[in-house]
Amino acid sequence: MKRIFPTHPIEEAVVENPWHKLRSFTDARIGLGRAGVSVPTKHLLAFQLAHAQAIDAVHSPLNIDGLTASFAEQDWSMEHTPIRLHSQAENRATYLQRPDWGRRLHRTSIERLQEHSSSRSEPYDLAIVIVDGLSAFAIEENTVPFLNELLPRLQDDATPWSIAPLCIVEQGRVAIGDPIGEILNARCVIVLVGERPGLSSPDSMGLYLTWAPKAGLTDAYRNCISNIRLAGLNHHDAARKAYYLLSEARTKKLSGVQLKDRTDDSVLEHDNEQHNFLVSQTK
């Protein structure tokens, strides 16, 4: 029996979703259409690739040598070489299974910080802690361009900031920045950390700021700037927000829930001669 094959192009097998134009505004997987009762092959392959990239981001080690080498090439190269530290999580498997160990410094790292701190009598204004977190790839991609935007602002401040040696932590989580800032006798600490990768953002870096850091503080004492990356909050805008929060923290000597990021207030707030559009103007 002669078999008859369809003569229409294979593309016609895909039924487009009328919402597909919204994909130009978001990385979310919306309006993908269908092929029969399934997702079109190209979107399925894109999903599998994104999933693989997320897995790689979580498990790939931080290239510390490459990162420190890139620091030395910048105009803002620090007075001291970066201090390499490690959490109590000895390896990646332990890090993923014991989040609490990722928040604590290894004994040898504590001793290394104490050795540096003992040689300085004056406190630092700021300690910058770089942590691999759940995406070393995010740290490798974003740390240098972000610091290129932030450090000149701090150095050109009317009261320039004294900055501790950069600290690079392996197998670390956000809270590990607090004991580091405490041992270094820093008035404030910011932690740059690789965020948990999503299926469209394996390169997202987060920033956490704490005034008067010390071991045992909760998230209520921290301010967060999230999704720092080229496809998210770009480095210039992230540095602008960070500089504002740092300046406010130094002035008010606080951080966390008591300190608000007001860099975008003009979007929703107006001067006294106008009414807030959120408030009913009926009388």
Image (cartoon, helix red, strand yellow):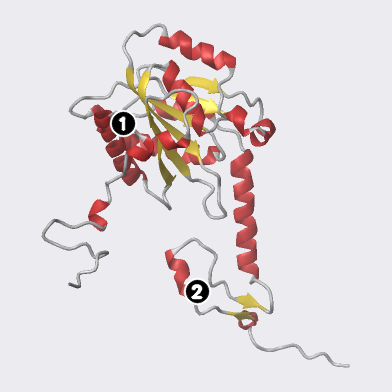
Q: Residue furthest front?
A: 283
- The residue positioned 50% from the left and 33% from the top of the image is 174
Is tag 2's residue or tag 1's residue first in the polypeptide sequence?
Answer: 2
- The residue positioned 60% from the left and 61% from the top of the image is 46
Q: Amino acid at mark 1?
A: Leu
Residue 194 in percent (x, y) is at: 51, 39
Residue 40 appearing in the image: yes
Compared with 232, 210 (above or below) is: above
Asked whether, in this view, residue 168 is left or right of residue 42, the answer is: left
Quadrant containing the C terminus in the rendered view? bottom left
Residue 237 in percent (x, y) is at: 32, 46
Label 2 belongs to which residue?
Answer: 20
Cβ–Cβ under 8 Å for marks 2 and 1: no
Label 1 belongs to which residue?
Answer: 151
Compared with 57, 171 (above or below) is: above
Residue 175 in percent (x, y) is at: 50, 30
